[in-house]
Image (cartoon, rainbow, N blue to C red):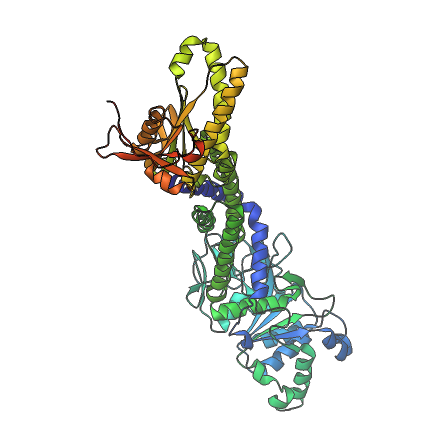
Amino acid sequence: MRSALRLRLALALAAGLLVVMIGPLLGRPELLTFDWRQRWLPAELSSGPRLLIVAIDDESLRVGAEELHRFPWPRSAYARIIQALAQARPAVIGLDLLLPEPGPGDEELVSVLVTTPVVLACNAGEGGAPGGLELEGSLPTRAPRWGVHQPPAGALSVSPFAMARVEAEEDGVTRRVPLVADNGGRGLSSMPAALAVRAGAGVVATADGVRAGGRLVTGADGSLWPRFAGGVGSFRYRGAWELLRGWQLLSDSAPVTEALPFSGEIEGAVVILTVTATSLYELRTVPTARVYPGGELMATAVANLLDGRGVRQLSGWGQAGLALGAALLLGLAAAPIRRPALLAVAWAGLAAIWGATALAVWQWADVWWPVAAPWTAMSVAAGAIVVEGWWREGAERRRVQGIFGHYVARDILKVLLEHPEAARLGGERRRITVLFSDIRSYTTLSEKLSPEAVVGWLNEYFGAQVGVIHAHRGTVDKFIGDAVMAFWGAPLPEPEQERLASACAAEMVRTSRRMAADWGRRQGPPLAIGVGIATGDAVVGNVGAPELRAYTAIGDTVNLASRLEGKTKELGVPVVVDEVTAHRCGLPVREVAEIMVKGRAASVRVFALSELDQAPAGAGDVQRDTVSEAH
């Protein structure tokens, strides 16, 4: 058991190491499990109600003034939207629009920007210029080296601006948002981080990553993997046309509550002005939606930072450790299992537990617990263990067949091959019935015949008698000259061992008589046998030297059976059985003597099988004689 456990753990460890080596190939499947978790277990973002998206949508392009029917709008339109929003006192306004060139209405927009908490957007990338908002703290060690591209044009730069760069993964899905970049040693802040800071969140950069509310929400690359609240529409929306209409009403001296009946949604909120009109806005694919507005992605990142949330990943070493641990766990579970079907059940159970754990830590701790690599490691380990089991089973079958193939009947061998564990080969005490058979006057016959003739007649005799023993489910132990030793009750228990052994002995005698008649016609030697049977405890198992072993039985019961076989000629009967066998064999018997046996202080009652009597009628009566064994 221990060697099997060590081997299976070694196979599981090898499987885990293999999966760790091919880990990069499992990146895509793991990202898919990330997306499934985002869809199946959306986050409840408590700061979600603090976000408001003002959308330049199709309706805003349709109902406005003539100059607003096409895009881009004059900057004065943005100024009026911001003015209207400012009347309801938002925490901060983010303009998710790039304004890299001067445009009509810049003066009006600048005049609004200097008095309103607004953050404008810029692009970022390699080789960019310095500038932009700086995120407080020290740079994460693996932050991207980006500078400012396309900053707000001219006087618009009076307003603070931050990078709005977001990149999709290789499969086209956007799953993370950079919060900070290394801009010449300064921490260039992203729009979500800047908006969250101005809304009161404690967002600070550290060497290990970005912290929000004291909690580490990114890795050392400074990118936030946000928890999504759902698909499109997870945040409140207002059309830009509603704000323009409100600005007009405010210009006509209408109260704020009348001009902006939804002013309660604006007060203290983080407002993001973005474009969602058909064919104008930036289409993104995220884990929860195939088409997702960039402004809502920004709102999702801000809400995560306000809540101090973000999906946390394990380090590379941690992920490798989990893959190895999953494989070893499968190896431990598989140690006592022999059948592939049960191993499949164990794999399914462990995989389900692993998946449930991944979902639990995702939901309650925002931890991305790897699934693809551990599941693969368990699968590879299970496959290796199945192959090892097949190999081991084959080797065990070959070993059992090598040990018992010539000794036991085919039906017993079949059971042993199907259940090799049933044969304990290391040695055990069993209750068995032992049979000894010997050819009478064999020594005299062997001296009269040539060696070739002796071997030929013996092989014919043994072939017939072994068939009789196997037909009665016996185990042939050995041939000793002309003698045959067999037993019942090992390697498999046999509840009818006394009956089978006695019936076998009777058939062996009848077979020898038929063979004797046949040999006589063929000018062969005379043939008569004696059989002794005893039942009791004996030690059964593989006995011998390391180079040569044999499955045999040893003990007093074996000695008694041999002694009884030697008494058959003296008692004048072909089969002699001990008292235990006589009482349990279920065949007609008669007591023939009470003898003294070498090695035993007490006498032994012995019996003959009545069906083999060749005496005249009446010989079946019980006879009792006392015979002492010569020493």
Q: Is residue 401 visible?
A: no
Q: Is residue 279 left or right of residue 272?
A: right
When the figure is inspected, residue 6 is found, relative to residue 308, above or below; the finding is above
When the figure is inspected, residue 539 is found, relative to residue 162, above or below; the finding is above
Q: Is residue 518 visible?
A: yes
Query: Which residue is at the front of the view, 184 or 313?
Result: 313
Q: Quadrant of the C terminus?
A: top left
Give the image location of residue 323, x and y in percent: 47, 49
Query: Which residue is at the front of the view, 6 or 164?
Result: 6
Q: Is residue 172 left or right of residue 217?
A: right
Q: Which corner quadrant of the image does residue 88 belong to?
A: bottom right
When the figure is inspected, residue 308 is found, relative to residue 266, above or below; the finding is above
Query: Which residue is at the front of the view, 404 or 200?
Result: 404
Q: Is residue 59 left or right of residue 625?
A: right
Give the image location of residue 599, x and y in percent: 24, 29
Q: Which corner quadrant of the image does residue 154 belong to?
A: bottom right
When the figure is inspected, residue 56 is found, relative to residue 579, above or below; the finding is below
